[in-house]
Amino acid sequence: MKWPSAINGVVAFGHTSGVSYNLSELFERVADAVPDREAVVTPSRRLRFAELDDRATRAAHVLADLGIAAGDHVGLQLLNGTEYLELMLGAYKLRAVPVNVNYRYVERELAHLYADADIRALVYHQQFAPRIEAVRRDTPTLEHFVVVRDGSDEPPIRGSIAYEAALAKAPATRDFAGRTADDLYIAYTGGTTGLPKGVVWRHEDIFFAAMGAGDPSLSEGPIGDPDEIVERVLPVGARMLIAPPLMHVSAQWGAFSIMYGGGTVVLLSPAAFDAEEVLDLAAQERANAVTLIGDAMARPVLERLRAEPQRWDLSSLFVFATGGTGMATSTRADIAALLPNVILIDGYGSTETGVAGSRARGSDATIEDGARFTVDERTAVLDDDMLPVAPGSGVIGRLARRGHLPLGYYKDAEKTASTIVEANGVRWALAGDMARVETDGTIVLLGRGSVSINTGGEKVYPDEVESVLKDHPDVQDALVVGVPHEHWGEQVVAVVSARPGHQPQLAALQAHCRGSLAGYKVPRALCVVDEVLRGPNGKPDYRWARDRASAVSP
């Protein structure tokens, strides 16, 4: 493997094997093998694999007619729907790069992302037109607009072409050349602080790191050749209901993993999250798996299920999965009680590492405490000398991942150098999370080092305290932050939302925490909010939490 020149400040691998793991080519192989199977289902549209590939091919020609070519960036400011997957695949067929645009971003964030990502064409749902219009003049690279109608009365951006009309006129010929495993996948992530940044992957690396690696049964290991992906297609495809928005990488990764195994992706309505719709669709579509984001999605679903346990036939369901952010032990226990026959999988990963670990519980297993995950040999916790810490040592280090890794951050060589590092002959991606390794080799996540709290000379990692708080029966969700204190330097403050019908009290939460945490980690102040603010990917907004905490902290 050789190193060619940098691409926009990101070093890229040169492809030498002659074997392509291009994401669109892999999909075409599956679509040709099982053309009549359902690939994606929404409340308004059902597409077989052949139909999805046809629409993706036409979408590629629509983009090509706009002048989009290899290496160009196409923004997707879209709600969930088949269009999202069509356009990702369509862009990849052209060797262009789809870029996820968070539809909840305000003008300042959008202006930054459009410019930072060098977006040339933007495909958007019509309702977002006013926000786009407000910043388009500040983005000279943004030349082309494609509107997806959504029933909104908002006037489209001037010069926009209508997606469905253009799709109907476009050819369905697969006359695409030059695709390789080195083509780029870019995902923008906001993280816990700061403006959004783009993480750049090669197709081959993201396929193996996060999109199933051609092993839908989770029993045979990664494929060794692109042609093997067809051999691994399951005789009966799994059906997965994906609740998070496709602008979030965990939803993209889950969708592609299922489709590469010949399975069916089931999506919710393109609207606000509805716990009842999750259960309705899971029952109607005979879903085998449901994937959500942490407690914020799981708890409302469980509350509806507890209220009417006989309403939904979930006999087809055998996996209940979450990603993006971990679930509290009490939530996991509720799932075990309400859905005793399912396997619970709590996944861990990041945009910079791919899927890094998981914790699973079958019907005959116990519920694990805290944010503890099982990882493979490619994940480690590194000390200050960039060496793996010894299991059971108690040393807190940085979580790291080796193997298939991203190339770095788009146009940010400095951040790339601090995140993708080589140490002792090994190339690592540093996720930013602090962790320790237990005696049995499991890894306990403690939270981002950038939001750790220094109180009286002791470090407190928010995740550790948050996981304990969320196990209290009065708490729906929680974030933990540090605010300035004249004696301690920083004081630990809990920002929590209440479960319906409950009212959290500081003394009760402190007593609960003391059973699991050292005294200096116990919150000294409490701020109760209507809702804990998180992004659509489940990531916490610590800046918002710190502002709220500062208002109540003495």
Image (cartoon, rainbow, N blue to C red):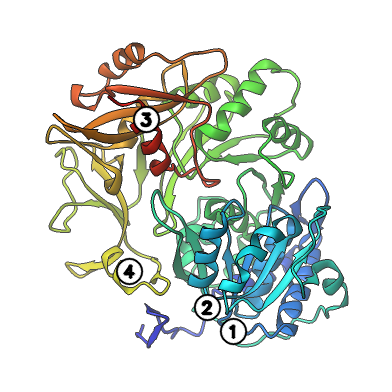
Choose top left, top right, bottom left or bottom right for residue 471: top left
Circles 2 and 1, Cβ within 8 Å, touching? The answer is yes
Callout 3, which amino acid?
Ala
Left or right position of 539 against 466: right
Residue 36 higher or lower than 281, as above or below: below
Label 3 and label 2: CA atoms lie apart by 48 Å
Circle 1 Cα neighbour tier, 10 Å, few/some/many (<14 / 14–19 / ≥20):
some
**Mark 4 to mark 3: distance in Å?**
36 Å
Determine which of the numbered discs, if any, sits on residue 13 in the image.
none
Left or right: where does residue 171 sit relative to residue 455? Answer: right
- Determine the CA span between mark 4 and mark 1: 23 Å
**Distance of label 2 from label 4 (alpha carbons):** 19 Å
Q: Is there any visible trace of residue 198 in the rendered image?
A: yes
Whole-percent x, y for residue 453 in the image = 24, 38
Describe the element under mark 1 as helix, strand or loop. Answer: loop
- Residue identifier under label 2: 183
Q: What amino acid is found at the position of numbered circle 1 in the picture?
A: Ala
User: Which residue is denoted by mark 4 in the rendering?
Assistant: 416
Q: Which residue is mark 3?
A: 551
Disc 4 is placed on an element classified as: helix
> Relative to 287, is 553 above or below?
above
**Is 20 or 60 nearer to us in this picture?**
60
Q: Which residue is mark 1?
A: 70
Considering only order in the chain, which callout, 3 or 1, is on the residue closer to the N terminus? 1
**Quarter of the figure with the N terminus:** bottom left
Helix, strand or loop for disc 3: helix
